[in-house]
Image (cartoon, rainbow, N blue to C red):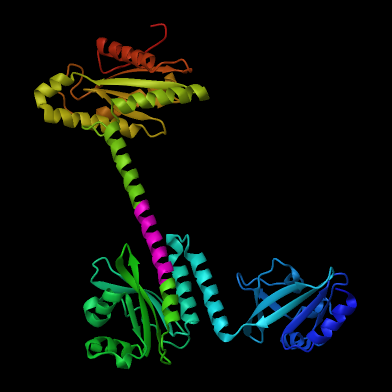
Amino acid sequence: MSDDSILKLWQVLNKLSLAILLYDNKNNTYCVNTAAQILFDLKHCDNLDSTAFNAVTLLSVHNNKHIAIESLFDSKTSTNIQLKKQQQSIPLNIALTQLSDSVSMLCLEPLKSDVIELYNFDRVISEISTDLIDIQNDDIDLHINFALKAIGTAFAADRSYLFEFNTDNETITNTHEWVNEGIEAFKQRLQNVPKTELPYFFEVMNATHLFQVNDVLKLPQAANAEKVEFQIQKIQSVLCIGLLFDKELIGFIGCDCVNFKRAWTHIDLIRIKLVGEIIANALKNIDYKKKLQLAQQQLITANQKLSLLVNTDGLTNIANRRCFDETLKSEIQRCARNKHSLSLIMCDIDFFKRYNDNYGHQKGDDALKQVAKTLNKLCRREGDLAARYGGEEFAIILPSLNAAECHQFALLLQQKIALLNIVHSDSSVAKTLTLSVGFYSTYPTKNTRPETIINNADAALYEAKETGRNKICQFFESN
């Protein structure tokens, strides 16, 4: 299209009531017709640059982000925008036409009130859905409150709320509530309300999952209890929709009007049902996540209990032989990697058969428990492990302890056992219960076998028992 043709077209467009913008990308200038000049409150019409629109606020309908005037002439721009003007928002439908290589024409049409309402609600639904799609348990209250405010505002209602059945399924609680400015809130009052106090409401809700009242004064006589409650809350019109979870009614959301009566329309029903489904799905997701977290925690607890049972000696409650074997393998590998020493103590209660024969097996079990508890208390460092090796024999794994340090540990062990002061009158080495101790210390390599360390420590224990008992012996490689 030639420049002359564009000029003639502009003479026509300038007389239209439809707002028109022309943009010349060669000169980066704009022209607006009279309707656009009025719409944007501009002082001039011709040869404007982008700064002329600095006072014009254009927003995206999707995220409320500011839109620059030049971006309206991008073919990727949405066909709907918002114009903020004198504290009001005017939705605009825009249509872009390329008149020539350099000149583009934009038509802007304010949307009609019914289209505006529909559009505004669609935006609300989009925002609510986005908020509640992947909701987490710790932010559900925030997003449900936003959803209630959004639908309350969209419906021009005075209150909107969410009620959920309690676990007894006989009472119901107002868990979330939004109220308009100047409207009294009733959430605190509506906690654990017995369903029997509102029999008509729940009869209708259970049957239809819908409670729609345009004028509460016209409720039937069967709804006298509901009338009283609505009068307390000054409700004139109310609309509630049931929330379903696996076809079971779990609660409801609703709106009510205090300052005026409202004749709820079929569109209102569709809208509140849509919001109800979104909120119900969000609650389902939270419920599923809670159940999954509970199941995971129960599984972890069960595994911990199983691990404890598998690795714990039933009588003494310290590590058993299985746990000892696994730990020794692991510590050999770790000490070999880090070039650390590793010590193993094997100890045996002296003349324990005599103790059992003299005092009985119950006393014998008690003695084993006290010795095990003492050994376990001495194992304070990470990696230390006291275990019942079998019968009256115990083993202690001591990573990163050399021979001298292990000997000091063994001395302390005997001192602690002596402090128990467990009388053993049939012992030939002392008047109280004692231990014979053998230990082996080494710097393991990747080729070190657990059996070697156990056999060496056991050989030292054998020496302690054969040479008088109640003593400490060390295994040397030259033995």
| Residue 373 vs residue 43, the one in the foreground | 43
User: Magenta span covers which residues?
Assistant: 276-293
456 vs 15: above or below: above
Q: Quadrant of the N terminus?
A: bottom right
| Residue at the far right in the pictured view | 4
Magenta span contains residue 321 = no
What residue is shown at x 40% (from left), y 26% (from top)? 398
What residue is shown at x 76% (from left), y 78% (from top)? 54
Give how far across and how far down residue 468 sits, in percent.
25, 12
Give how far across and how far down residue 477 sits, in percent.
42, 9
Q: Quadrant of the C terminus?
A: top left
Give how far across and how far down residue 152 sits, in percent.
46, 80
Quadrant in the picture for residue 282: bottom left
Give how far across and how far down residue 376 sits, in percent.
31, 32
| Residue 175 vs residue 365, the one in the foreground | 175
What residue is shown at x 30% (from left), y 69% (from top)? 249
Whether residue 47 can be seen here? no
Whether residue 247 can be seen here? yes
What residue is shown at x 47% (from left), y 68% (from top)? 143
380 vs 137: above or below: above
How many numbered discs? Answer: 0
Q: Is 60 positioned to the left or the right of 399 in the image?
A: right
Which secondary structure type mostly characterizes the magenta part of the structure? helix
Magenta span contains residue 288 = yes
| Residue at the far top in the pictured view | 478
Quadrant in the picture for residue 439: top left
224 vs 249: above or below: below
| Residue 110 vs residue 136, the one in the foreground | 110
Quadrant in the picture for residue 123: bottom right
